[in-house]
Amino acid sequence: MRIMTVSVLRGRLVLEDSIVEDGIIEIDGPTITRVCPVSDYEVEAPEATDSTFLPGLVDVHCHGGGGESFPNAESAEAALVAVMEHRRHGTTTLVASCVTASAQVLRARAKTLAELAKADEIAGIHFEGPFVSHERCGAQDPTFIIDPDTELTRTLLQDCEGYALSMTLAPEKPNAYGPGSVAEALIAGGAIPSWGHTDSNSMKAREALAYSRERFSQVVTKRGPRATITHLFNGMRPLHHRDTGPIAEFLSDAARGGAVAELICDSIHVDPTLVRDVYEMVGREHVVFITDAMAAAGMADGQYTLGPQDVVVKDGVARLAQGNAIAGGTAHLMDCVRVAVTHGGIPLVDAVYMASMQGATILGDRTVGSLAPGKKADIVEVSGDLNVRRVWRRGTVVE
């Protein structure tokens, strides 16, 4: 006989399309069983609170936190430190991102992270490189950047054991898209091409976007059948009216229901007003908030590593020790939601959607991303100023 473990939360509820000012969430074990206004709740409700409840957040691009880095983690235990750092701050579904490295290192990390995915600690694996642009490599180590290699891609997908979500690649690189390409191998293997770290012109970007659209229309995939854009604006040729580069094509494709644009809404990578402008131009259904966080997330300023690169964090900004490139973020995804609302003027419902439901859609996971009956009981309790109070994952409070 199953023992009932029902608990009831009361407060302001941020749902997929609306806010319930005084609502109830009923949880039975790991699952949400009911969401409704207090006025519709037939039994005695808990006392009213000043808390707001959000769905657990979903980050599809994260390199680490809590002093640990996924690209450097040689054990599942080390990687789990980073997972827990973000989980305690509201990210209950997380994709672990690697950076450009040797094939040997990438394969080793894929196998380690696949173990975490099988244990339901992470939701997938993202490879940021090695098929990216030397000119727009950012914090990627140019030593290990290579031309797109379909066989290596297939090998990495096998090492991930079905948990590979995406790979960042530059559309101008040979064999990035088209018959026999890396993009073709990714889509056939149940993963997603994420166009970025690119010095592409508009033509190559448009062709790559059109190709990924066409391929997704021809296959059945467990993922959201759309390419993504790796951290729009960062790591790519900037927009200029006589030398347009890829950004206008990325925005145009997103607005037409093609690729989903990642945005790092941390006030460092992209100005919050530009985040708002993109949201207003293409709509929340075509934007996903990410952290691009590295080991320093949740940590003090100091020296860290990101793959083979040394990083110095000063005043919360991570930069390569050699050179001045920004080397990932130091925020949690809840920080990005707060920035979007308080500095970008984006409505809370939509900011939360872009940090939860959109990531779940990209993953193809219908069990997370919103507060609704039947969903996993992944819940974030926040204060009026959007600071985290408590987090539940699968119905259990995260310590």
Image: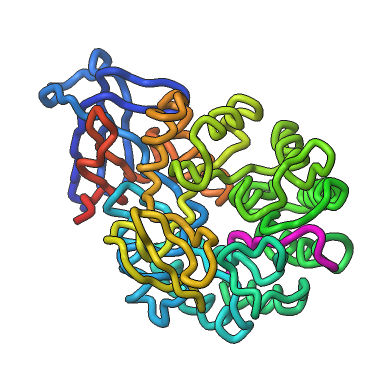
How many labels were placed on the picture? 0
Residue 249, given in percent of the width and then of the height, sits at: 78, 41
Residue in the image at 75% along x and 57% along y: 199
The C terminus is located in which quarter?
bottom left
Q: Is residue 177 above or below residue 364?
A: below
Which residue is most to the bottom? 104
Which residue is most to the top? 39
Q: Is residue 370 left or right of residue 60?
A: left
Residue in the image at 67% along x and 58% along y: 197
Magenta segment, which residues? 162-175
Q: Is residue 345 left or right of residue 87?
A: right
Q: How is the image coloured?
A: rainbow
Residue in the image at 76% along x and 50% along y: 216
Residue 362, given in percent of the width and then of the height, sits at: 58, 47
Residue in the image at 20% along x and 32% along y: 9
Q: Nearer the viewer, residue 138 or 28?
A: 138
Which residue is most to the front? 323
Q: Is residue 130 above or below residue 143?
A: above
396 part of magenta stretch: no
Residue 49, given in percent of the width and then of the height, sits at: 15, 25
Q: Nearer the viewer, residue 211 or 264?
A: 264
Q: Is residue 341 above or below residue 135?
A: above
169 part of magenta stretch: yes
Is residue 163 something that shows in the picture? no
Q: Is residue 395 left or right of residue 321?
A: left
Q: Is residue 65 left or right of residue 354?
A: left
Q: Nearer the viewer, residue 325 or 205?
A: 325
Which quadrant would residue 133 be assigned to in this image?
A: bottom right
Is residue 96 something that shows in the picture? yes
